[in-house]
């Protein structure tokens, strides 16, 4: 985390983050480097599926989206990444996956996670919006 003074009592705080697990290149190894360099959180998905979880806005014309994209969730590698991130102290950002992936994240995550740029589905029905409860009845605040 970096802090820069802007005035007598004002501060601007910035968190180092990675938008999209595709930055891992299909390997857990970069996570240690990211943690050592101060990365605070990482989103599993961005605009497309890259082997970790199904993205909320993955469109069929992306080569790896496939025909069944709304049904998929967190992959086995996504589960491994979740555990490794928790072990390294990197927060999991759940802002962009589909709701089926979010259900899998609830089942997999053992530590609190964040939604850095997602809204509640009750406020706006967008693919990135989080439902008030998962299909299993868990609320987003249940992990802390």
Image (cartoon, rainbow, N blue to C red):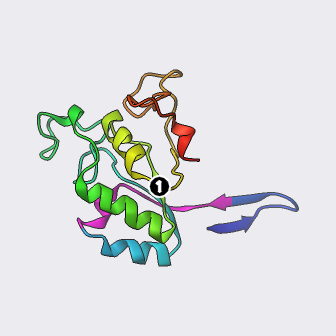
User: Residue 27 in magenta?
Assistant: no
Please tell me which residue is depicted at 11% across the width and 34% down the height of the picture: 67
In the depicted structure, whether residue 109 falls above or below residue 134 = below
Mark 1, Cα crowd under 10 Å, few <14 / some 14-19 / many 20+, is few
User: How many numbered markers are drawn?
Assistant: 1
Which one is in front, 60 or 76?
A: 76
The residue that label 1 is drawn on is: 110
Q: Residue 25, image x and y in percent? A: 25, 66
Which region of the structure is painted magenta? 13-26
Q: In the visual, does 142 lie left or right of 81?
A: right
Please tell me which residue is depicted at 31% across the width and 75% down the height of the picture: 29
User: Residue 17 in magenta?
Assistant: yes
Q: Residue 50, image x and y in percent? A: 23, 53
Q: In the visual, does 8 lie left or right of 96?
A: right
Q: Residue 96, image x and y in percent? A: 38, 42
Please tell me which residue is depicted at 51% across the width and 32% down the height of the picture: 119
Q: Residue 23, image x and y in percent? A: 32, 63
SS label for mark 1:
loop
Please tell me which residue is depicted at 14% across the width and 47% down the height of the picture: 64
The quadrant of the rendering that contains the N terminus is bottom right
In the depicted structure, whether residue 27 falls above or below residue 120 = below
């Amino acid at each position: 985390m970096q802090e820069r003074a802007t005035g007598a009592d004002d501060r601007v705080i910035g968190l180092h983050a990675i938008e999209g697990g595709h930055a891992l290149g299909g390997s857990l190894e970069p996570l240690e480097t990211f943690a050592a360099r101060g990365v605070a959180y990482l989103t599993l998905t961005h605009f497309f599926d890259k082997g970790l979880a199904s993205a909320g806005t993955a469109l069929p014309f992306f080569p790896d989206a496939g025909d069944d994209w709304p049904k998929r969730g967190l992959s086995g590698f996504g589960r491994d990444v979740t555990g490794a991130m928790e072990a390294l102290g990197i927060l999991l950002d759940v802002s962009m996956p589909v709701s089926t992936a979010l259900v899998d994240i609830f089942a997999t995550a053992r530590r609190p996670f964040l939604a850095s740029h997602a809204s509640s589905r009750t406020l706006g029905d967008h693919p990135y919006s989080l439902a008030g409860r998962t299909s299993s009845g868990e609320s987003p605040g249940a992990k802390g």
